[in-house]
Image (spheres, helix red, strand yellow):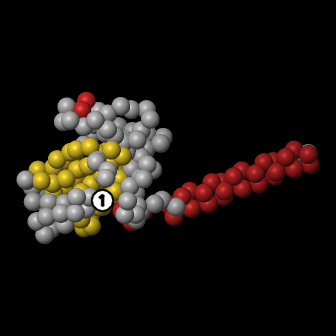
């Protein structure tokens, strides 16, 4: 084998090795940078034939005020840029309430005590009744307010979910 061809093969082999090494380093560091990684649960989607990352926030809040912790899950749509629909599990009912008609981006826990235009999801006691409510900002520029929410009187993309009189109630967030 001529020396020129051998040199090209060595250079090509080295380039391929470096490429694989860089790719492996990049995928390893991605897991470290995922916000709220401790709440991530991988789910295999047989239709898409890949693993998706859902978020399960458990044992953090008691929305129905029964003394037992409830749960919020965010279920990924598996897109190139994932959006998530929320599910709320109430311990008093022992069931999930799924809100599949709206999605949010970045379902991460923000440690703030007031709302701003960027935050897609926040849990606070908005009405100061001693029980937390859930805020969702559907500030997706590509979508309108879903029809099922409009039929419940929702007029904005800033939604508050409160547990009152034995049920989850949705309303527009009213800022003071």
Residues 99 and 79: in front is 99
Q: Residue at x 19, y 53 (%)?
A: 162
Residues 109 and 164: in front is 164
Q: Secondary structure at mark 1?
A: strand
Q: Is residue 138 visible?
A: yes
Residues 96 and 29: in front is 96
* Residue lying farthest to the right in this orientation: 3
Decide if residue 42 is on the left or right side of residue 67.
right
Dot 1 corresponds to which residue? Answer: 123
Q: Is residue 49 visible?
A: no
Decide if residue 10 is on the left or right side of residue 75.
right
* Residue lying farthest to the left in this orientation: 165
Decide if residue 51 is on the left or right side of residue 26.
left
Q: Give the percent coordinates (x, y) of residue 103.
A: 34, 42
The picture quadrant where one finds residue 25 is bottom right
Q: Residue at x 37, y 59 (%)?
A: 114
Q: Residue at x 54, y 58 (%)?
A: 30
User: Which class describes the residues within 10 Å of circle 1: few (<14), some (14-19), or many (20+)?
Assistant: many
* Residue lying farthest to the bottom in this orientation: 67
Q: Give the percent coordinates (x, y) of residue 31.
A: 50, 61
């Amino acid at each position: 084998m001529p020396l020129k061809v051998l040199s090209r093969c060595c250079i090509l082999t080295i380039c391929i090795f470096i490429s694989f090494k860089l790719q492996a380093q990049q995928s390893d560091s991605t897991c470290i940078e995922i916000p709220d990684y401790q709440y991530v649960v991988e789910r295999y989607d047989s239709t898409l034939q890949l693993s998706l990352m859902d978020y399960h926030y458990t044992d953090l809040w008691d929305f129905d005020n029964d003394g037992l912790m409830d749960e919020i899950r965010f279920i990924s749509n598996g897109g190139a840029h994932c959006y998530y629909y929320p599910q709320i599990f109430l311990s008093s009912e022992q069931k999930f309430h799924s809100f599949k008609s709206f999605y949010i981006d970045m379902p991460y826990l923000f440690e703030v005590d007031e709302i701003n235009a960027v935050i897609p999801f926040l849990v606070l006691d908005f009405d100061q009744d001693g029980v937390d409510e859930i805020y969702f900002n559907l500030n997706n520029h590509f979508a309108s307010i879903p029809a099922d929410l409009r039929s419940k009187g929702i007029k904005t993309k800033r939604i508050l979910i409160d547990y009152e009189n034995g049920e989850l109630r949705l309303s527009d967030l009213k800022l003071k």
